[in-house]
Image (cartoon, rainbow, N blue to C red):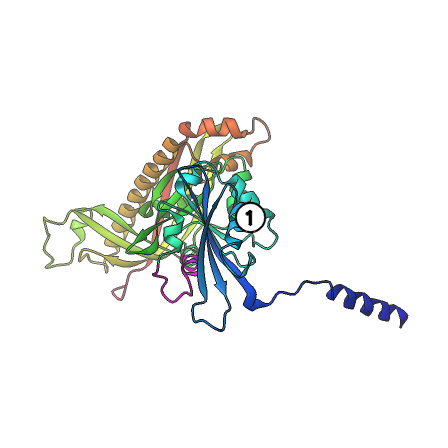
């Protein structure tokens, strides 16, 4: 009994030491953005969520300038009557000019802040992040920061972009043989949109992968479960399989095929003893959503020809994207990391791996199985 009373007394004493925070007095930071200024100072933009019963506007945007992210927070405190707290930071944006100088210091600040979740999302912007966070179009979200978080989160869930969490970025950064990637955002009609992936050498932004090529990097990084994409085929690739009565249109420059509910199986085989040679096998199962020519989908030969044409085009696109990655000297597919998993001798170091990237010789083998192709099946 005495022991129980002692424990209760200790709990009461401890609870009395916890500082009180009234929610009406808090400015809860939901999004942050960082831009590099001409004087090498950093401009920070904070999106705040505030519970003020006297106003219908629950969102506030505060900008400030300083030399550090903590200095930005201090300056921002002087511009609002609310106490700023970071427990709900869901997305952090970095202007590409700032990201080109390296994100390590900002990653360290975010990871050291116990109130910031390691599942917070990151993105690079090709316009000032302040412009993005101050844009007015946020659909049904309470503020632009929440809208951008939903946009990125939805795109990850539907396998439109790679995982952009702080945890994954740090895993790739600290790994030998893998480079991080983050979504690249821009403004269109005063609305934030994803227009590609930002490529990194270690923690430095070095280039952009266009939106249409994201799917091919996704295929190289992970197995997919329900992806969706459109691919362009040569205009005459299925002319021998048109429906009876269909007329060839000489003005059509290409044939477009849309696939959805795409699942893939990835097998990457490094050559033992040769860190520049890889064999990548990708098996894809997908459903045909749309095709821009009236082909005879009842014919098995038509489906087989379509599968072969799509396989060839995917392999061509994978080779093209790999060439761009080699030119930028980045390895977001983590091929070097996979090489190190199969050998204990002559393992790649960070320097030797980076020098090896331009010499990568990757052989792609793609197999596609179309499972469903509409009501004509």
274 in the magenta segment? no
Percent position of residue 115, x then y: 59, 55
Identify which residue is drawn at 56% across, 43% down. Answer: 108
- Relative placement, left or right, of 283 versus 350 is left
The image shows residue 344, relative to residue 312, as above or below, that is above
x, y percent for residue 221: 45, 44
Q: Is residue 253 above or below residue 376?
A: above
Pick the front one: 129 or 295: 129
Helix, strand or loop at disc 1? helix
What residue is at 85 percent from the left and 71 percent from the top?
Answer: 5
Reading the image, the residue beneath label 1 is 110
Task: Please report the residue visible at 10 percent of the width from the left and 52 percent of the height from the top.
Answer: 249
Query: Along the line of sight, which residue is nearer the eye, 352 or 264?
Result: 352
Residue sticking out furthest to the right: 2
Task: Using the rendered image of the protein, determine whether residue 370 is visible from the camera's viewpoint.
Answer: no
Q: Is residue 233 left or right of residue 61?
A: left
Give whichever of 218, 131 is nearer the camera: 131
Give the residues in magenta: 136-151
Q: Residues within 10 Å of mark 1 (few under 14, many from 20)?
A: many
Number of dots carrying numbers = 1
Give the x, y percent position of residue 212.
31, 47
State the quadrant of the C terminus: bottom left
Quarter of the image that includes the N terminus: bottom right
Q: Can the viewer see residue 30?
A: yes
**Magenta span includes 147:** yes
Q: Is residue 32 above or below residue 14?
A: above
Q: Nearer the viewer, residue 193 or 288?
A: 193
Q: Position of residue 276 (x, y in %)?
A: 45, 29
């Amino acid at each position: 009994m005495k022991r129980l009373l002692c424990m209760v007394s200790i709990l009461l004493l401890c609870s009395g030491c916890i500082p009180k925070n009234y929610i009406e007095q808090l400015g809860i930071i939901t999004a942050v953005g960082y831009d590099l200024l001409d004087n090498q100072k950093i401009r920070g933009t904070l999106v705040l969520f505030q519970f003020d019963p006297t106003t219908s506007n629950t969102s506030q945007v505060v900008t400030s300038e300083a030399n550090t992210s903590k200095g930005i927070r201090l300056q921002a405190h002087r511009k609002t009557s609310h106490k700023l707290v970071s427990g709900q930071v869901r997305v952090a944006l970095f202007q590409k000019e700032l990201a080109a100088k390296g994100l390590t210091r900002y990653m360290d600040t975010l990871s050291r802040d116990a109130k910031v979740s390691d599942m917070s999302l990151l993105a690079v912007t090709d316009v000032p992040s302040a412009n993005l966070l101050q844009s007015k179009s946020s659909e049904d979200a309470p503020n632009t920061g929440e809208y951008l978080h939903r946009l990125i989160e939805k795109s990850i869930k539907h396998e439109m972009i790679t995982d952009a969490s702080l945890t994954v970025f740090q895993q790739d950064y600290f790994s030998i043989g893998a480079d991080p990637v983050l979504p690249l955002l821009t403004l269109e009609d005063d609305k934030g949109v994803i227009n590609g992936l930002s490529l990194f050498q270690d923690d430095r932004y070095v280039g952009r992968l266009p939106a249409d090529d994201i799917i091919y990097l996704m295929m190289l990084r992970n197995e997919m479960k329900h992806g969706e994409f459109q691919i362009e085929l040569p205009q005459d690739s299925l002319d021998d399989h048109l429906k009876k009565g269909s007329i060839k249109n000489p003005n059509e420059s290409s044939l477009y095929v849309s696939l959805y509910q795409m699942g893939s199986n990835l097998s990457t085989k490094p050559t033992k003893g040769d860190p520049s040679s890889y064999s990548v096998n990708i098996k894809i199962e997908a459903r045909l959503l749309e095709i821009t020519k009236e082909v005879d989908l009842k014919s098995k030969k038509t489906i087989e020809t379509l599968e072969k044409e799509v396989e060839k085009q995917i392999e061509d696109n994978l080779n093209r994207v790999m060439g761009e990655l080699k030119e930028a000297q980045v390895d977001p597919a983590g091929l070097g990391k996979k090489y190190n998993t199969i050998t204990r001798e002559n393992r790649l170091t960070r320097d030797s791996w980076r020098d090896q990237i331009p010499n990568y010789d990757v052989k792609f083998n793609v197999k596609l199985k179309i499972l469903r192709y509409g009501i004509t099946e």
